[in-house]
Image (tube, rainbow, N blue to C red):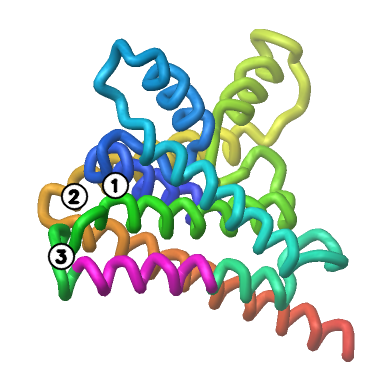
Amino acid sequence: MLILTFSTGVIDAVGYLGLDRVFTGNMTGNVVILGMALTGTTNLPVLGPVLALVFFFGGAMISGRMLRGKSEGWSGPTSLAVGLVSLLLLAVSTGLFFFGTHAFPHLAEAVTSVLGLAMGIQAAAARHVKVVDVTTVVVTSTLTGLAADSRFAARKGQDWAKRLLAVMLILLGALAGAALLTVAMWLPILLSGVLTAGVVVAGHRRVRADAVKELS
C-alpha cells in the first residue's frame, strides 16, 4: 500500500502538470478546482476535473463489484483489481510512447479518463485491503492522525512511522513524477505501472503462501 501511495504521487504529478491541472488520484483537489472554475472568474479547467471525478467513481464501482463478498485483506480478486490498474497504466504509457502526446484531438482528456478510472479501482482495492492510514490516494486523514495522536496532543499510541512514510512517499512520488515528466509523459506513467505490477506479484505470492500454510 505504501508503494501504491508513492505511485499515486507520480500519477497526480502527471495529471496536474501534464494534463492541465487535473488530479487523477486526489479527488478532493478536483472538487476544489471544479468549484473555483465554475465561478467563471479563473482560467481553471472544468472538463478535466469532471472526467477525472466520473471515471474515478466508475473505477471504484468496478473494483467494489470485483471484491464484493470477499473478506478484508489481500485476496485473489484484489490481485485482479490491482493488476487491472497496472494494465491500464502500462497501456497508457505504451500508447503515449508510440504515438506521442499529440496523436489525436482530446488526447489529454482521454488520458485523464483512463488514469482516473485506474486510480478509482486502486482506491477501492486499497479500502478493501484496509491498511489503517494508508488509502494510497490521500494523506489528509493520515496527517490529522499523526498530529492529533502525537505525544504533544492526545498522546495516543500510533504507528507514526507508517503514517509518516505514507506522507513522505506521496511527496516523493510527486517529486519523481514531476522530474520524469520533463523527459516524457509516458515515462512516469510507466514507472507507476511497473511499481503496481510489482505490488500485484508480491500480494499474490502472499496469498499463495497463506494458502499453503492453511493446507499444512
Instruction: Choose between 122 and 155: the one closer to the eye.
Output: 122
| Residue drawn at x 74%, y 55% as measured from the top left | 128
Q: Position of residue 164 (x, y in %)?
A: 53, 33
| Residue drawn at x 37%, y 40% as measured from the top left | 48
Q: Which residues are magenta?
A: 84-96
Residue for badge 1: 14
How far is mark 3 from mark 1, CA to CA? 18 Å
Asked whether residue 169 is in view, the answer is no
Residue 185 position by quadrant: bottom left
Are the residues tagged 2 and 1 within 8 Å (C-beta)? Answer: yes
Residue for badge 3: 103
Secondary structure of residue under mark 3: loop
Q: Position of residue 30 (x, y in %)?
A: 45, 32
Q: Looking at the picture, does residue 46 appear above or below residue 156?
A: below
- Using a 10 Å C-alpha cutoff, classify the residue at mark 1 as few (fewer than 14 neighbours), some (14 to 19) or many (20 or more): many
Q: Quick check: is 88 in the magenta stretch?
A: yes
- Kind of residue at disc 1: Val
Are the residues tagged 3 and 1 within 8 Å (C-beta)? Answer: no
- Kind of residue at disc 3: Ala
- Kind of residue at disc 2: Leu
Residue for badge 2: 181
